[in-house]
Structures are given as C-alpha cells and as structure tokens.
Amino acid sequence: MQKLLSINNLHVSIKESEILKGVSLEIASGEIHAIMGPNGSGKSTLALTLMGHPRYAINNGLINFDGKNLLALPVEKRGLSGIFLAFQTPFEIEGISLREFLYQIYLAKHPGSGVTEFETLLIEKLKILNLKPKFVERHLNVGFSGGEKKQAEILQLAILQPKLAILDEIDSGLDVDALKTVCSCINKIKATNPNLTLIIITHYPRILSYLVPDVVHIMQNGTIVQSGTKELAQEIERGGYSL
C-alpha cells in the first residue's frame, strides 16, 4: 500500500524541554494505527506537532505527508491538504451554531461551493451518523455532553472527508454507551471511505475493541518503544506499560 505519512527521527521541544526524542513512524493509506502510552509519553505532542501547533519547536526530523514536506506547511495548509485533528477537549464557542461552523469549514476546503451542495452533504452525513437535524442548530459544543462533543467532532470529520484523521483521546470522558456510539459513527465514515487513514491516540485498549487497529504502537518517554498487532494492546491491558 502507498505510504501516506512518514515520520523520520522527529525531535520536538516545548521551550527548553524536549518531549519527542526521535519518533519514526510510517502509515499507509487506509490503515488504522493506535498509539498508546502513559501520561506524559508524548502522544498528544505528536498529534499537535502533525497539525502544526506553534507551541512546539521542531529540533530535528522529517515529516512527509502525501508526497509533501509537512513541516513546510502552515497549519491551515495542513488542514486543506487532508489532515484532521479531533480534539481531546473540544472548545465551546457561544454565538455560532454547529451548522454555521460546518458550512464555513466546508467552504474553506471547497471555495465557490453553494449552500445547496453543503446542505445535501450535511443531510447525508447526519443520516449516516444517526444524528437529528436539530443537533447542528445548537451553539458549537455549548451545553454538549462529553459524548455530544465527540459526535460533533466526528461530524466535522464526515464533512471534511480528510485523508488522515488524528483522534486524540476521543474516548476521554465517555462512558461505555457513549464510546460505542462515537466508534460506530467513525466506523460508518470509514466504511464509506476505505482510504481514510486513522491515528487513534489513547491510554486504554477499550476503544480498540470498536476501532480495530492494523498496528499498535507503544510510546514511552518521547519515543515509540514497541509496535505490533492488536494483540499488543491486550498485553498492555493485562500487564500495563512495563514491557
């Protein structure tokens, strides 16, 4: 399969503190990769670095995405080139509806498109995700439950149709039923677009029962220390991160 993302010897710091200490990773188009590890291991730093967060300084390394030098692209260009990041804690924005927000991000990727095209796509995705139309009339994440915030993130994913989706602890704060619902939505999107590539960042293997990974990576102290099949996650469940 064609490589979509290639990371080579990536070193990243925040101020004077080095967080990523030589991360290397290759992901083919359409694959699902899980990155697991304890708190402070660098998982979210990797996600935010891929997205281009200005807080993180690249000390060394290369990132190639879909044939492009990702490090040369500003954050908005990374989004337009096909990278999507679902936040661990989505922001609440008063005064703008989810519908209006979705329309604006759709126009950013499809300039010149009309309202009719967007509404057709929105109705289609709401049906696929089993969401009611009134869901998108609410202010963006304001008063949403944890599960509803994650569903709103997944609806954005469905509308943007990226090449790579990074799910940063999408399971955080969700009970079992909410997790099943969110993962069901992701699987439906993946079924409609087999080329969608997923990076699932998590502490716990429970989510991997619903989003089955092709490869599991264990990150500790700023680097990937082991990679394997989904059975590796089960080993972590039994014995923890002391590999």
Image (cartoon, rainbow, N blue to C red):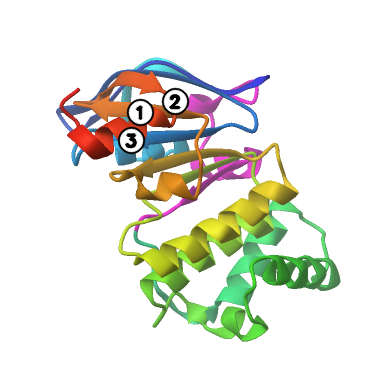
- Residue 104, given in percent of the width and then of the height, sits at 64, 65
Tag 3 or tag 2, which sits nearer the N-term? 2
In the picture provided, is 185 more to the left or to the right than 50?
Answer: right
CA–CA distance in space, label 1 to label 3: 5 Å
- The amino acid pointed to by label 3 is Gln
Look at the image and tell me whether residue 56 can be seen: no
CA–CA distance in space, label 2 to label 3: 10 Å
- The quarter in which the C terminus is drawn is top left
Look at the image and tell me whether residue 206 can be seen: yes
- Residue 189, given in percent of the width and then of the height, sits at 66, 53
Q: The residue tagged with tag 2: helix, strand or loop?
A: loop
Q: Is residue 76 above or below residue 1?
A: below
Foreground of the two, 95 or 164: 164
Residue at label 1? 232
* Residue drawn at point x = 59 percent, y = 63 percent: 155
Q: Are marks 1 and 2 in contact (CB under 8 Å)?
A: yes
Q: Are marks 1 and 3 in contact (CB under 8 Å)?
A: yes
Q: The residue tagged with tag 1: helix, strand or loop?
A: helix
Local crowd size for mark 3, using a 10 Å CA cut-off: few (<14), some (14–19), many (≥20) = some
- Residue 98, given in percent of the width and then of the height, sits at 56, 75
The disc label shown at residue 234, or none: 3
- The amino acid pointed to by label 2 is Thr
| Residues shaded magenta | 65-88
- The quarter in which the N terminus is drawn is top right
- The amino acid pointed to by label 1 is Leu
Q: Is residue 63 above or below residue 127?
A: above
* Residue drawn at point x = 30 percent, y = 64 percent: 173
Q: The residue tagged with tag 3: helix, strand or loop?
A: helix
The disc label shown at residue 229, or none: 2
- Residue 116, given in percent of the width and then of the height, sits at 85, 72
State the image quarter where residue 178 is shown: bottom left
* Residue drawn at point x = 72 percent, y = 71 percent: 127
